[in-house]
Image (tube, coloured by chain):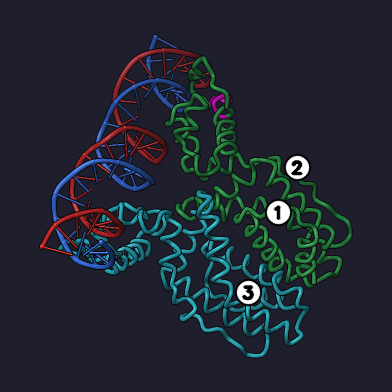
Chain colours: A cyan, B green, C blue, D red
DNA sequence: CTTGATCTAAACGGACCGTTTCGTTATGTC
DNA sequence: GACATAACGAAACGGTCCGTTTAGATCAAG
């Protein structure tokens, strides 16, 4: 992020936490500033005062770096509601998620990750088998609870979840994250029937 | 596509249809072979035996080229079903669409276009305001007809359409276009309630 | 015959890529 | 205390692609 003056030398035969933090912070800042278009390992290295080999050592794919900087604090930033109905839970959670995507760097990171997955097999695999299962675990419980309450059959949990996910992807990818309450509510109603 | 031996000179003060065809064909072929990762204007020009300035003249953005090579024959390849219920129409149409995306270059083109839209503002605008309205007009009539039949309120047409679109985007972007009939049918059922 | 738009080729400066080489630093082991 | 080991940053590598510019050739339209 901020150009460090003094060189951050090796601290011996182990990973440097400072370097890791500097790289993540630089990546986050660069992405926030320039978006996915202006995101390059070269520039991250420059800003972090880190060597490119160091970055490539720890994050072999751009996807790995994206995943690393996608808020581990997402779960912290977005509380999991439990208000007694899927409808109100989803409304709340989706609103929070969209705000998170709008305000944080997170939306750009996520868009970048998806874009990267269209270019790189490794990124696609990381997205599908690492990122998504982790990130979907939390919202999924909303659907599980709803099924337990008898709002729908248990066999429909993942189908409904997937429709909700697709809906969100579409909106983030087309940069339509305005919090249009009524429009959002209508779609969520459909997902709860 | 195939490396033309003889140089295709100017045919005067008007656009050369042969060059246009050669560029589109080269772009299609390259995309089919290497995917979005290996897609560059430079390589398209090489294969088409065309000059880069020529390509940039007619397709200033990569997105324009993508749109140009996305089958204008999509509507021809995917008949619009009218079987009396949204459920069966959607099932048929979605199955056909996914096959189209799988078998033709179309899926890769589409994925490339979306990826490009994450990098370029111009591409995003083209996607949202040119490509989508055109391509969605046909499937939209399925929803309109269903509303006319009284399957749901007219005000829900675009909400349901959007959920369906998001569902499709999710599957094409994660390269999950296998024709899993039962899974597909379950989700379409949900969209028709 | 002139104007003007088109074509390809070639080259431009610049940005990144992902890798390699190098000298330095400190850890953990013997 | 000596030493192998692993991490660090800097610099440079060859390579690709970007988007633009220059130049010379072609041909339609006025």
Q: Is residue B182 left or right of residue A26?
A: right
**Image location of residue B10, percent across then percent down:** 48, 20
Query: Quick one: label 3, few (<14), some, or many (20+) residues within 10 Å?
Result: few
**Image location of residue A14, percent across then percent down:** 29, 64
Q: Secondary structure at mark 1?
A: helix
**Image location of residue B111, percent across then percent down:** 58, 50
- Residues marked 3 and 1, same chain: no
Residue drawn at x 46%, y 71% as measured from the top left: A102
Q: Is residue B18 magenta?
A: yes
Residue where numbered disc 2 is placed: B77
Residue drawn at x 60%, y 45% as measured from the top left: B108
Q: Residue A183 — which label? A: 3
Q: Nearer the viewer, residue A80 or A31?
A: A80
Chain letter of disc 1? B
Q: Is residue D24 above or below residue B21?
A: above
**What's the CA distance linking mark 3 and mark 2?**
33 Å
Q: Is residue B87 left or right of residue B30?
A: right
> Quadrant location of residue A62?
bottom left
Residue drawn at x 59%, y 44% as measured from the top left: B109
Residue where numbered disc 1 is placed: B137
Prevailing secondary structure of the magenta residues: helix
Residue depth check, mark 2 versus mark 1: number of the one nearer the observer: 2
Q: Nearer the viewer, residue A14 or B55?
A: A14
**What's the CA distance linking mark 2 and mark 1?**
15 Å
């Amino acid at each position: 992020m901020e150009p460090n003056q003094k060189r951050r030398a090796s601290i011996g035969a182990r990973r440097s936490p400072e370097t890791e933090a500097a790289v993540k912070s630089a990546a986050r800042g660069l992405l926030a500033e320039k978006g996915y278009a202006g995101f390059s390992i070269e520039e991250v290295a420059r800003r972090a005062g880190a060597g490119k080999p160091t970055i490539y050592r720890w994050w072999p794919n751009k996807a790995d770096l994206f995943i690393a900087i996608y808020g581990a604090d997402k779960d912290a930033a977005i509380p999991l509601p439990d208000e007694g109905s899927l409808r109100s839970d989803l409304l709340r959670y989706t609103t929070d998620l969209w705000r998170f995507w709008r305000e944080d760097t997170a939306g750009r990171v996520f868009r970048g990750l998806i874009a990267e997955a269209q270019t790189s097999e490794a990124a696609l695999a990381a997205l599908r088998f690492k990122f998504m299962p982790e990130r979907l675990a939390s919202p999924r419980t909303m659907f599980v609870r709803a099924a337990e309450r008898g709002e729908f059959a248990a066999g429909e949990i993942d189908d409904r979840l997937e429709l909700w996910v697709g809906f969100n992807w579409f909106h983030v990818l087309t940069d339509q994250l305005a919090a249009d309450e009524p429009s959002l509510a209508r779609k969520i109603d459909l997902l709860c029937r």
